[in-house]
């Protein structure tokens, strides 16, 4: 016998976990989103260590938020004001739901917008169309290796830049920026050069594919702008094997 519509509406799987003494809740409608919750402490420990250094009066810009794992940690555990950007439709819906079920309205705010090198309408090319999916790309159907791929679905989207967000006062000046957009990080940097010069900005976490020349140029650009990073941190967490070999977070500090 099939489920009634009322029974279907009441199906609401949520993964709960304790982090630093705080109870976090993540909507988990499929295996991918459940995995994201279960792997929170092990997937990117360097990101968690970075967030652990924030102050409660800091502002964080989360570019490529997915369903909001690190948005929720920063906002709920540390009281950081977070502005999260995620253009993919199913991820954006869950990002908002996770903000809602963690009672973070007024602390975290999500926008269904891509962040790139210019503002305007364009295509968001999806590698897969399911909640929690990643490796999508705004503008071009290329993957994190900058190689063409056949999109499972092409969604309409709007992009803006970091500088436009600040100049239009859509968000306050952040002290911390996370950039994880699966391959076009150089475009995000190109659209944020005014903001990156401002001394209020304390740190920037960027996922870098060391196999790509444009990404290696990001590292040099950040150094030229007066930021520093730790070789120890990079080498410790840089992926050494698998499909993402050579990919890892660089955490730049001013």
Image (spheres, rainbow, N blue to C red):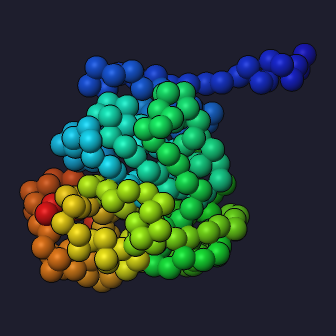
Tell me how many marks there are.
0
Nearer to us in this view, 233 or 84: 84
**Is 90 left, or right, of 115 in this rendering?**
right
Residue at point 42%, 31% (across, down):
38
Residue at point 29%, 34% (across, down):
78
Residue at point 37%, 43% (across, down):
81
Nearer to us in this view, 25 or 159: 159
Residue 34 seen: no
Residue at point 37%, 37% (across, down):
75
Position above or below: 212 against 102:
below
Where residue 36 appears, as percent x and y from the top left, is 46, 39
Q: Quadrant of the C terminus?
A: bottom left
**Is 197 left, or right, of 81 in this rendering?**
left
Where residue 47 appears, as percent x and y from the top left, is 27, 47
Residue 205: quadrant of the picture: bottom left
Where residue 195 appears, as percent x and y from the top left, is 31, 71
Residue 173: quadrant of the picture: bottom left
Where residue 213 appears, as percent x and y from the top left, is 30, 83
**Is 131 left, or right, of 155 in this rendering?**
left
């Amino acid at each position: 016998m099939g489920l009634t519509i009322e029974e279907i509406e009441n199906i609401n799987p949520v993964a709960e976990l304790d982090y630093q003494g705080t109870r976090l809740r993540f909507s988990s409608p499929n295996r991918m989103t459940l995995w994201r919750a279960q792997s929170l402490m092990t997937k990117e420990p360097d990101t968690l260590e970075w967030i652990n250094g924030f102050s409660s009066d800091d502002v964080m810009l989360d570019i490529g938020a997915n369903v909001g794992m690190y948005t929720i940690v920063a906002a709920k555990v540390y009281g950081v004001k977070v502005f999260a950007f995620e253009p993919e439709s199913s991820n954006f819906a869950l990002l908002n739901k996770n903000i809602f079920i963690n009672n973070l309205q007024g602390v975290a705010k999500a926008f269904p917008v891509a962040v790139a090198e210019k503002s305007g309408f364009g295509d968001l090319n999806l590698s897969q169309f399911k909640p929690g999916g990643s490796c999508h790309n705004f503008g071009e159907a290329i993957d994190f290796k900058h190689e063409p791929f056949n999109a499972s679905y092409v969604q309409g989207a709007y992009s803006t830049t970091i500088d436009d967000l600040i100049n239009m006062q859509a968000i306050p000046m952040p002290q911390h920026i996370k950039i994880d957009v699966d391959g076009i990080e150089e475009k995000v940097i190109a659209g944020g050069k005014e903001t990156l010069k401002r001394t209020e900005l304390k740190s920037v976490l960027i996922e870098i594919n060391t196999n790509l020349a444009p990404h290696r140029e990001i590292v040099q650009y950040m150094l030229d702008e007066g930021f520093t990073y730790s070789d120890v941190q990079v080498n410790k967490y840089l992926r050494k094997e698998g499909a993402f070999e050579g990919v890892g977070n660089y955490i730049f500090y001013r």
